[in-house]
Image: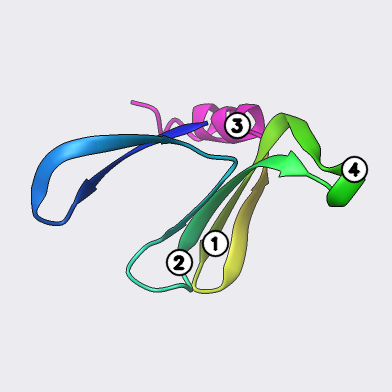
């Protein structure tokens, strides 16, 4: 996975290759995480599909793959 970031002052963006992303949306009770790896030590390996979690006010709204999330969004006509 790659992320593109930019400082709060703007300027050039920076691209970084990562295996785990945690985005806190103003506070840690609202967050989105994406995990590309599973296991620990010798069992640590890249997942078949990244695991995405969306949390609102500390409550899990979604946990699954990007394809599962896409289907929910399509079925709820949130994609335009």
Q: Are marks 2 and 1 in contact (CB under 8 Å)?
A: yes
User: Which residue does the numbered mark 1 point to in the structure image?
Assistant: 55
Q: Tell whether 39 sits left or right of 62.
A: right
Mark 1 Cα within 10 Å, few/some/many (few <14, many 20+)? some
Residue at the front extreme of this rendering: 42
Q: Could you say whether the residue bearing mark 2 is in a helix, strand or loop?
A: loop
**Quarter of the image where one finds residue 4:** top left
Instruction: Find out whether residue 13 is within the magenta segment.
Output: no
Q: Disc 3 marks which residue?
A: 66
Report which residue position mark 4 lands on.
43
* Image quarter hosting the C terminus: top left
* Residue hosting label 2: 30
Mark closest to the chain's N terminus, 3 or 2: 2
Q: Is residue 21 left or right of residue 49?
A: left
**Dot 2 or dot 4, earlier in sequence:** 2
* Mark closer to the observer (4, 3): 4
Badge 4 or badge 1: first in the primary sequence: 4
Residue plotted at (60% across, 31% down): 66
Query: Viewed as shown, does residue 77 lie left or right of 47?
Result: left
């Amino acid at each position: 996975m790659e992320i593109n970031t930019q400082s709060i002052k703007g300027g050039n963006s920076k691209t970084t290759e990562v295996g785990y992303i945690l985005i806190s949306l103003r506070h840690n009770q609202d967050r989105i995480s994406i995990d590309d790896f599973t296991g620990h030590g010798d069992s640590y390996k890249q997942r078949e599909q990244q695991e995405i979690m969306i949390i609102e006010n500390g409550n899990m709204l979604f946990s699954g793959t990007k394809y599962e999330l896409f289907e929910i969004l399509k079925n709820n006509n949130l994609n335009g």
